[in-house]
Image: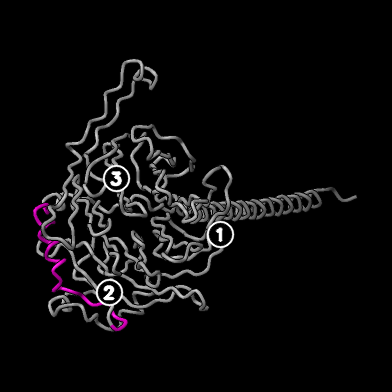
Amino acid sequence: MSVVGFSGEWILSTRGSRLVAVHIKESNREPYVFECSSADKKPKPTKAENDSDGGSSEEAGSDNILALVVSPSGKLVALTDDNKRLLVFQRDPWRCISTRWVVRRCVSLAFSPTEEELLVADKSGDVYSFSLAEPEGAGLLKMGHLSMLLAVLVSPDNKYIITADRDEKIRVSHHQSPYNIQSFCLGHRQFVSALHIPSGHPSWLLSGSGDGTLKLWEYKSGNLLQSCDLRQLDQTLNSETDPNLDKDEVQNHNPGSVKQNATVCRIISSPDGHHVAALCERVSAVQFFTLDPDGELKLVPHSQLHLSQPPLDMAFNPDGQLWILMESRDVPVQVFTLRQSCWQRAADQPELSRVTDGLTPHWNALEAAMRTTNHFQHLFKLSYDNITPYLQKKQQRLEEQQMKRTKVQEDGGKRTNVQEEQQMKRTKVQEEDGGKRLRTEPLS
């Protein structure tokens, strides 16, 4: 999975099994590159541990990075890979300060606002807590779902843990006692794939799903404030061609980009909390919204940014510029700035050329990571229509029963006719026999 993010003045990008950090301001700072395949290997379990686990062997991973998160201060970065490593990095200077292992492969990470704790959500539905004060300490089981987890967050006041799973549920639990559930945010019709608390709005929660909707919640009460279907917005806002497209891009552009099974894979907000950007997987567009706390509509559709190809990820830098990671060797990153209420591409920035030069040498790793299939396709629940076959069989059974009853009635009518004919014959015979006897009797 390819991810882009910011840690202060550093832009971070994960490329296959590689973490690359490039300073966007100072050209004399060498990029930091970390290769997960060269990290410490997990110690082999002893015979006693194997016996306690039933002798089962673990499947070896591929070292590809599965999730990345930056701490609120930007000084710490954590990632987890397919080999179940949990790595924590410190910035300035860059170094790995902790290497630990998780029980199962993880899908989402979250720092606590105090940066004393790192929460890890895995595919089995469990959330583990790892202490940052003890770099070698084992993880403690914090809470669990009955379904696969896809996202985890910690509220800005550090009071709540917000988790989302494959069964369309968003759960808000108390941080100190996760068995106490504050609320549920229910309304999605497919798995919940993305969560985000917008900057400057600590009581709101944005969620994206495989049903193609973006929802705004008041998560403490579980109230749904607004829901936007990105598929309908795509048809509405695509009436005009985006000014950021080149001539060749306009010719090859397909306005109906958001498909029926589009999955919202990323939700981010600008540092001032005024703008929200939503991205659907394998869709060549970014949908922008504005947040209006005082308006009737809290989440107001703003515009849509069309791109020449589906982006991999996106992030706002501290200055409010939108950086988009692309599937392009020549232009791996594009930068957009809000000018006159329109997001316009900034192609002449020195920071952009510096980042491009830093990321291009590692493009082979990114190309290998891009060859994977849709990350969310296997999460869609298949619906089976067992009612229609049942009704068809029932109708067929009723028709067969009716045919049998009709046949019985017809057979009964035939038998009745035969009996009547036989009775008539017997009567006729009796009458003929009676006449014969009368004629043969002697006269007295």
How many tags in the picture? 3
Identity, as a three-letter code, of the amino acid under mark 3: Leu
Q: Which residue lies at the image location 24% right of the left edge and 72% below the top edge?
A: 336
Q: How is the image coloured?
A: one colour
What numbered label is drawn on residue 148? none
Q: Residue at x 35, y 46 (%)?
A: 107
Task: In the rendered structure, find residue 79 and report the number of the disc placed on it.
Answer: 3
- Residue 321 seen in the current view: yes
**Which is in the foreground here, disc 2 or disc 3?**
3
Residue 298: image location, x then y, percent: 48, 73
The residue segment tinted magenta is 340-363
Front one among 342 and 207: 342
Separation of disc 2 and disc 1 at Cα? 31 Å
Residue at numbered disc 2: 305
**Dot 3, how many residues are within 10 Å of its Cα: few (below 14), some (14-19), or many (20+)?**
many
Q: Quadrant of residue 299?
A: bottom left
Tell me where residue 134 appears, x and y as whole percent. Answer: 37, 35
Specify whether 150 is left or right of 256: right
Mark found first going from the N terminus, 2 or 1: 1
Q: Is residue 40 left or right of residue 442?
A: left
Q: Nearer the viewer, residue 25 or 396?
A: 25
Is residue 148 toward the left or the right of residue 315 in the image?
Answer: right
Image coordinates of residue 191 in percent, x first then y, are 42, 54
Give the Cα separation between the discs numbered 2 and 3.
29 Å
Crowd class of label 1 (few under 14; some 14 to 19; many from 20; radius 10 Å): some
Task: Tell me if label 2 and label 3 are in contact, CB under 8 Å.
Answer: no
- Residue 78: % across, % down: 30, 46
Secondary element at image label 3: strand
CB under 8 Å between discs 2 and 1 = no
Q: Earlier in the sequence, mark 2 or mark 3?
A: 3
Kindly identify which numbered label has been placed on residue 222: 1
Residue shown at 72%/54% (left/top)?
428
